[in-house]
Each structure stands twice: as C-alpha cells, then as structure tokens.
Amino acid sequence: MSDQQTEQHDDCMQRFIDLANAMKDEGVPVNVVSWALMTSSGIYSTYSVTGNSGGLTPSGVDKIADAYKKNLANIQQLRKAQDDQETSGD
C-alpha cells in the first residue's frame, strides 16, 4: 500500500470508528453497531471484488475471511504491544 493509500486507510478507518461511536452515543448497543459494521464490510468487500453483478464463490469467501482473520490478529498484536508498553511504563 502506498503512503497515500495508508493515509486514506487511516482516515477512513477513523471516520468509521467515529460513526460507530456516534451510533453508540445515540443508544444503539455496541454489539449491534459491531454487527452492522461487519455486515456492511462484508457487503462492501463483496462489491469490491464482484461489483454489483454477483456474489463471491466459496473460495472468494474463504479469501476474504482469511484477510479478516489476519487483520484481526494484527490488531490484537498491536493492542497487546500497546498494553505491554503502557504497563511497563515506557
């Protein structure tokens, strides 16, 4: 990913988080906001691969699911590293 795409990614991610927090602040339960974001992401991921004219093949579903799994694992690694750093006082 280019530096410009990384910056766009970070900006878009923050906008989604801000919108999710606004929904939570409006009284929507966090788990419902999370499910809605996941569903929306799945719909948009399908669109990004197939456009408006179709769905994913089973192998396409597996590829996107694997990408989500890797991303989630990376997020958890980063969070653990941040927690460890905060705990150690660095």
Image (cartoon, rainbow, N blue to C red):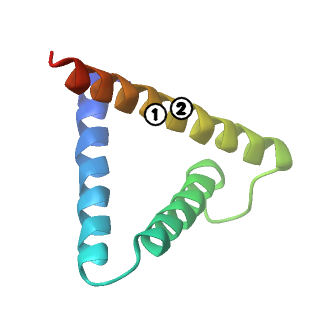
User: What number of labels is visible?
Assistant: 2
Q: Amino acid at mark 1?
A: Gln
**Contact check, label 1 and label 2, Cβ < 8 Å:** yes
In the image, residue 34 lies at what x, y percent? 47, 64
Mark 1, other Cα within 10 Å: few <14 / some 14–19 / many ≥20: few
Query: Nearest the camera: 42 or 32?
Result: 32
Task: Tell me the residue at 37%/81% (across/down).
Answer: 28
Picture layout, residue 26 above or below residue 48 = below
Mark 2, other Cα within 10 Å: few <14 / some 14–19 / many ≥20: few
Element type at mark 2: helix
Identify the mark at residue 89; answer none if there is no mark: none
Which residue position is annotated with label 1? 76
In the image, residue 32 lies at what x, y percent? 48, 74
Task: Tell me the residue at 51%/35% (across/down).
Answer: 71
Query: Nearest the camera: 62 or 73?
Result: 73
Picture layout, residue 51 above or below residue 62 = below
Q: Is residue 82 left or right of residue 66?
A: left
Q: Residue furthest left?
A: 90
Q: Residue furthest right?
A: 58
Task: Tell me the residue at 47%/28% (across/down).
Answer: 74
Q: Amino acid at mark 2?
A: Ala
Identify the mark at residue 73; answer none if there is no mark: 2
Element type at mark 1: helix
In the image, residue 4 lies at what x, y percent? 24, 30
